[in-house]
Amino acid sequence: MLVIEGARDIYGQVINLKLENDSDEYIDASQLTILPAVIDPHVHFRVPGMEYKEDWRTGAKAAICGGCTMVFDMPNTKPPTFTAIQLADKKALIDSQLQEVGIPLHYQLFFGADKHHLHEIATVQNQVVGIKVFMGCSTGNLVIDDDESLHAVFEIAAKLNMLVAVHAEDETLIKARKQNFHGAADYADHSTLRNEEVACVAVEKAISLTRQYGTRLYVLHMSTADEVELIRKAKKDNLPVFAETTPHHLFLDTTHYARLYGKAVVNPPLRDSKHHAALWQAIKDGVIDTIGSDHAPHTLEEKNQTYGACPSGMPGIEFMLPLLLNASHHGRISLAQIVSLTSARAKHIFQIQSHSDYVLVDLNRTDIVSHTVSKCGWSSYEGMQLTGWPIYTVLGSRCYQVSAGVNGTNVRIFMDGFYREAY
Ligand code: DOR
Ligand code: ZN
């Protein structure tokens, strides 16, 4: 049995854990704070077809290092996941990769909406966490860019009581803006080409479809003040609408192209920092429900290509919680709001039955982001100094030590555990 004693929850109450496993260890956690483990509702772990960027062996380790024990994976794989057979094949691959590394990470899958395969949706009704609709093209070729198919998806989902998660960027507008762009575009032009309006028009459309059909709607990666106002209004109207933002939209902005070049290219794009205040306010007001890492790794070789060839997306799952804890250290957000964003709201929205994993964090530990276990091997946050780090991630009866012990000493590897070697 592994006994973890003395950690305090966000209300100051001492929580002792007794994990039924083969180890015979005692951890004094009296310097640590215990939080529910992170649920990340938005990852791209790249299986099948793009395992050279990430797979579930490395993705699961990255999740555990980020204090996360449950992820929802997206369908823009190769091939995309839009048939029942593809879904079953994908699950089999994931299960075998997780077994290989001995990490029983909890996961759910989103089903891809494809206009030629809408009849498949009903066949997976109880096997997926929701239907993912790309309203604009991003990585891969999944897209629903015609109104007829979009209406059909919302109608089918409502009938089946399934949730629709939208990548809300309007494809028609993106195409028009690209056509009207003169000269050679550079990385930073990405934020102009896929501007705020591109996102707002799509969010407005998705909300109007929910108003029409009553579909449960989850707006992914919200990045602008205007989207926040659309969601605020929809919630006021009692529509079943939920919203997510990402670490990169909260902690990065368009000035970061100068430092990150292609690594900063992501869909929806980084915005002017003036949007940050609206996103933080929306978190406080409960207009933004969740944070999803949108962990979308690409290799450095791919990201170093010139604009146009450089794919969109960045990894994020390992540093989402440290970034939030650091924001809390600086008074930007409370620990209660972090719990709400990283697990409580997701449990409610996605109707997760039982989930009692934990992450034990050291709120006073300061470290520099310097090492990543994601297969892509880089992070946009490299070099940032953050205060507040996960130390142990508890998944069922397993306990993973994910960074060195309190005060940077005392590195031990527990049963089934590993730690970031750089620490
Ligand atoms: O930047 C992005 N990358 N946005 C997406 O919608 C997809 C993701 C990916 O899969 O690379
Ligand atoms: Zn995504």
Image (cartoon, helix red, strand yellow):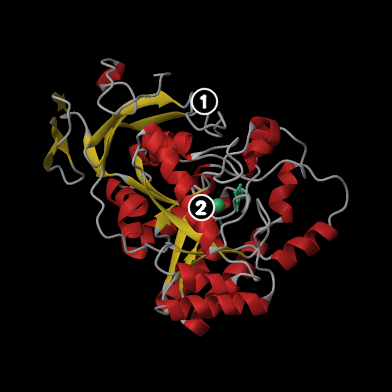
Can residue 12 be seen?
Answer: yes
- Marker disc for residue 383: 1
* Mark closest to the chain's N terminus, 1 or 2: 2
User: Horizontal placement of 2 versus 278: left or right?
Assistant: left
Could you say where residue 45 lies in the image, as x and y percent from the top left? 51, 44
Residue type, mark 1 in image: Gly
Circle 1 SS class: loop
Screen quadrant of the N terminus: top left
Mark 1, ligand 1, within 8 Å: the answer is no
Name the quadrant containing residue 400. top left
- Is 151 rendered above or below residue 43? below
Could you say where residue 253 lies in the image, as x and y percent from the top left? 59, 44
Question: Image point 46% across, 62% down: which residue?
Answer: 243
- Is 378 rendered above or below residue 201? above
Residue type, mark 2 in image: Asp
- Is 380 rendered above or below residue 214? above
Nearer the camera: disc 1 or disc 2: 2
User: Horizontal placement of 189 versus 284: left or right?
Assistant: right
- What's the CA distance linking mark 1 and mark 2? 39 Å
Screen quadrant of the C terminus: top left
Q: What residue would you read off at disc 2?
A: 89
Circle 2 SS class: helix
Question: Image point 31% across, 60% down: which residue?
Answer: 352
User: Horizontal placement of 360 versus 218: left or right?
Assistant: left
